Image (tube, grey):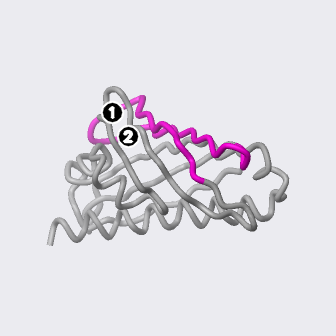
Amino acid sequence: MQMTDTREIAASPEVVWAAILDPEVLKQCIPGCEAMEGNPADGFDATVVQKVGPVKAKFSGKVTLRDMDPPRSVTLGGEGKGGAAGFAKGEATVSLAPSETGTALTYDVEAKVGGKLAQLGSRVIDGFAKKMADQFFTNFQGVVEGATE
């Protein structure tokens, strides 16, 4: 499953960049995130509870940042294991560019699932993944713009 979108964020690329690297901001933005610890260099450990169709699972995972080009681009990678529910992993390449209103944030997301989650079918999984990505970046925009007001 792949998707691409762009959002306008009313903050400078430097402010948006700092937010992407902040575990507290990420925790607030990831739907269902219960815990987020770590740092950009070593990665972040996360605990996320999610319900996908009839399957509810607690995922323990790792978020890594690579290909960092401050304050222009970064690749966020994530992998979570949900026990019997299976696993989810994905990657988001995030690009930041100055715009008239602040920053144009473009993301390109690719996600994969396995185990019971994969048995739900691609339509359910694709819809869920799109909803999660949209929710993350909507939350991210709200947190960043709220912090700059």
Please state, as top left, top right, bottom left or bottom right, where the C terminus lies in the image.
Answer: bottom left
Q: Is residue 100 magenta?
A: no
CB within 8 Å, label 1 to label 2: yes
Residue at 57% over, 52% down: 58
Q: Secondary structure at mark 1?
A: strand
**Residue 96, position in %: x, y?**
35, 49
User: Which residue is denoted by mark 1 in the rendering?
Assistant: 69
In the rendered view, tell whether residue 111 sits above or below residue 130: above
Residue at 39% over, 60% down: 29
Residue at 29% over, 43% down: 21
Q: Is residue 71 magenta?
A: yes
In the rendered view, tell whether residue 52 sits above or below residue 42: below
Which region is colored magenta? 58-86
Residue at 54% over, 58% down: 49
In the rendered view, tell whether residue 77 sits above or below residue 107: above
**Residue 142, position in %: x, y?**
32, 70
Q: Quadrant of residue 122?
A: bottom right
Q: Quadrant of residue 53?
A: bottom right
Q: In this rendering, would 49 be left or right of 120?
A: left
